Image (cartoon, rainbow, N blue to C red):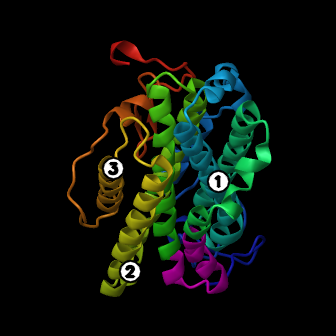
Amino acid sequence: MDRKKIYNPESTESVNERRIFGGDPTGIFELNNIKYQWAYNLWEVMLNNTWFPKEVDMTRDVNDYKNLTAAEKDAYDKALSQLIFMDSLQTNNLIDNVNPYVTAPEVNLILVRQSYEEALHSQSYAVMVDSISQNSEEIYELWRRDMMLKSKNDEIAAIYTRLAEDPTESNFLKACFANQILEGIYFYSGFTYIYTLARSGKMLGSAQMIRFIQRDEVTHLVLFQNLINTLRRERSDLFTEELKAEVYEMFRSAVKLETAWGQYITQGQILGLTDEIVEQYIKYLADDRLTSVGFEKLYNVEHPIKWVDDFAKFNDQKTNFFEGTVTNYSKGSLDFGDDW
């Protein structure tokens, strides 16, 4: 694949001729005339979701963190360190590795917005670390010192590196699936450990920060689901049996990797997250992500911790990402209701 030209006045490409990649854009963002309506709708949803880390009160977390058990503190630190790595990776990956090959301007918009949001999440983690840690370098250096985390990060980055080194259409599509795994499995798993602490009344500020972050990640997940589904319609030739086999193997590998990581950081000592529940939840996420892009389930398991989905919600927020209908985007505080 060739990188798109940033200025291309010779282009005569019409709106209907636009492509996710391989098009011939002028470089002008003519947004009164668009091909991929889902992209522009998603852009508006992302704008409506705008928030800033300093809006979240982390005051209570300072004392809560001091009173965590050693196991809880270890899980919190490692989950946070993993999230820091993934958002750092995504910020650069989207701008340097994915967007240069995307030739539809309305899709360029949301990739740039996503990159901004990933950078915002990095700031959010910095606020969390500064609030609870007397030595922030301990958490920021975990990705170097913890070999379990280092090996996981190496595997996550490998597919993105493959696209950078060999930018083919097939590798671009595989990178889309890798993004879906990152946004829809690895991030969701990491969020769950912090939600579990908050469910027992600890680290509520951290959980509120994660709720904002996860709301962004929902749109990121939908973005890549739509990219994959659009490419399936426009470039069905790419969805070979070989590609499908590789995708299934990517998901199997991700489930194995994330299950081992989840069990490693919880050590069976985080209330409500047994080794069995961790594994089943990861498998449930994988199945859900696969079916959203037209693939069959691998595991056929039930959602073992449905309370997580309710915990992550903002009031009565309901969004149809294909129509862009948004009913509520308020920044309410955590509401535990009668069941907490």
Quarter the N terminus occupies: bottom right
Would residue 216 be seen by someone viewing this image from the given angle? no
Q: Quadrant of residue 66?
A: top right
**Residue neighbourhood size for the residue with mark 1, other residues' Cα within 10 Å, grouped as few (<14), some (14–19), many (≥20):** many
**Of residues 325 and 140, which is closer to you in this image?**
140
Judge whether residue 161 is colored magenta.
Answer: yes
The residue at the point 22 percent across, 48 percent down is 302
Bounds of the magenta span? 154-172
The residue at the point 29 percent across, 52 percent down is 280
Report whether 58 appears left or right of 221.
right
Q: Say above or below: 303 vs 199.
A: below
For residue 246, the mark is 2
**Residue lying farthest front?**
70
Which residue is under mark 1?
Answer: 87
The residue at the point 69 percent across, 39 percent down is 124
Give the Cα separation between the discs numbered 1 and 3: 22 Å
Give the Cα separation between the discs numbered 3 and 2: 22 Å
Q: Quadrant of residue 234?
A: bottom left
Which residue is under mark 3?
Answer: 281
Q: Look at label 1 and name its amino acid.
A: Asp
Judge whether residue 216 is colored magenta.
Answer: no
Which circle's residue, 3 or 2, is located before the other in the chain? Answer: 2
Which circle's residue, 1 or 2, is located before the other in the chain? Answer: 1
Q: Say above or below: 124 vs 84.
A: above
Q: Position of residue 311 (x, y in %)?
A: 42, 29
**Residue neighbourhood size for the residue with mark 3, other residues' Cα within 10 Å, grouped as few (<14), some (14–19), many (≥20):** many
Q: State the SS at label 3.
A: helix
